[in-house]
Image (cartoon, rainbow, N blue to C red):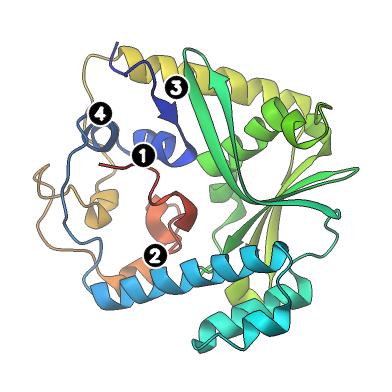
Amino acid sequence: MNLPEDFVFSPSSLQDYVDCPRRFQLKYLQRQRWPAAEVDEMLEFEKRMEQGQRFHQLVHQHLLGIPADTLTKHISDESVRQWFETYLKNGLTDMPKTRFPERTLTIPLGKYALLAKFDVVAIGDKAIIIDWKTSRKIPRREWLAKKLQTIVYRYVLAKGGSHLNKGQTIEPEQIEMRYWYAEHDGATLSFTYDKEQFATHEANLLHLVDEIDSRPDFPLTEDMPRCRFCTYRSLCDRGTQAGSLVDWDTMDTDDVDLADFEIDIDQIAEIEF
């Protein structure tokens, strides 16, 4: 058994494993600190991270009932202001009125647990998950459909969503997940769900967990482009120079999973050393 009994999986930890088993081992099992920079222009990188965090905070506050005018007058960053204005214009289009912002659900997954932290879940006749994105680029739908976040969020809501629905099960066919892109006037990529996908995802996730828990070693990825933006690259003898921020912004999203610059802001701090 590789995992501690109280290990809690998340979309980001599962994605790390799928991208590179060695990265999963270093980050979650050995809890290895390795403070290499992801990209060459760290000040710009950190600025974008802060902008994304501020936008998420504003949306959360608005969904909790703070008036938009009160929030807007305190926005000093022009990009964040534009994103928030776009959210006010169309961020809640077709959303049921019962809304749960910044909500975490944890469900059993085999011997372990699986956690999903939603930006917002809205429940009515449909159950809509929205994930706010401040990315410079909209990824290809085919790439996003395979992302563990897309798979796990819908699965967790179907499995454990009764907690948000007055004890009533949320059927897979009721569920829709939307990625909402502030930088692109609120464009969305949506993914529906059904019982067949649910069954397939459950089987695949259980298999993935069993594989992680029982494998004798954790090899490096063979997909070398991923290593350009990995903080462990020099530890693994995969280079010492940070990848280019320009390359990150323009690369194909099939090339490396980190092409979405937002990097799941809400999950960055989920592992505490």
The answer to which of marks 2 and 4 sits earlier in the sequence is 4
The quarter of the picture where residue 239 lies is bottom left
Image mark count: 4
Labels 2 & 1 near each other (Cβ < 8 A): no
Identify residue for label 3. 208
The answer to which of marks 3 and 2 sits earlier in the sequence is 3
Identify residue for label 2. 251
- Amino acid on which the number 3 mark rests in the picture: Leu
- Amino acid on which the number 1 mark rests in the picture: Asp
Residue drawn 82% across and 57% down? 95
Q: CA distance from mark 3 to mark 4?
A: 16 Å
Labels 1 & 4 near each other (Cβ < 8 A): no
| Residue neighbourhood size for the residue with mark 1, other residues' Cα within 10 Å, grouped as few (<14), some (14–19), many (≥20) | some
Is 101 on the left or on the right of 222, as rendered?
Answer: right
Q: Nearer the viewer, residue 209 or 125?
A: 125
Labels 3 & 4 near each other (Cβ < 8 A): no
| Residue neighbourhood size for the residue with mark 3, other residues' Cα within 10 Å, grouped as few (<14), some (14–19), many (≥20) | some
Give the number of the mark in front: 3 or 4: 4
- In this picture, is 272 found above or below 28? below
- In this picture, is 273 found above or below 108? below
Residue drawn 23% across and 33% down? 22
Label 2, secondary structure: give it: loop
Give the number of the mark in front: 1 or 4: 4
- In this picture, is 57 found above or below 253? below
Residue 255 in view (yes/no) = no
Identify residue for label 4. 29
The answer to which of marks 3 and 4 sits earlier in the sequence is 4
x and y percentages locating residue 255 in the rendered image: 38, 53
Q: Quadrant of the C terminus?
A: top left
- Amino acid on which the number 2 mark rests in the picture: Met
The quarter of the picture where residue 156 lies is top right
Residue closest to the far right: 125
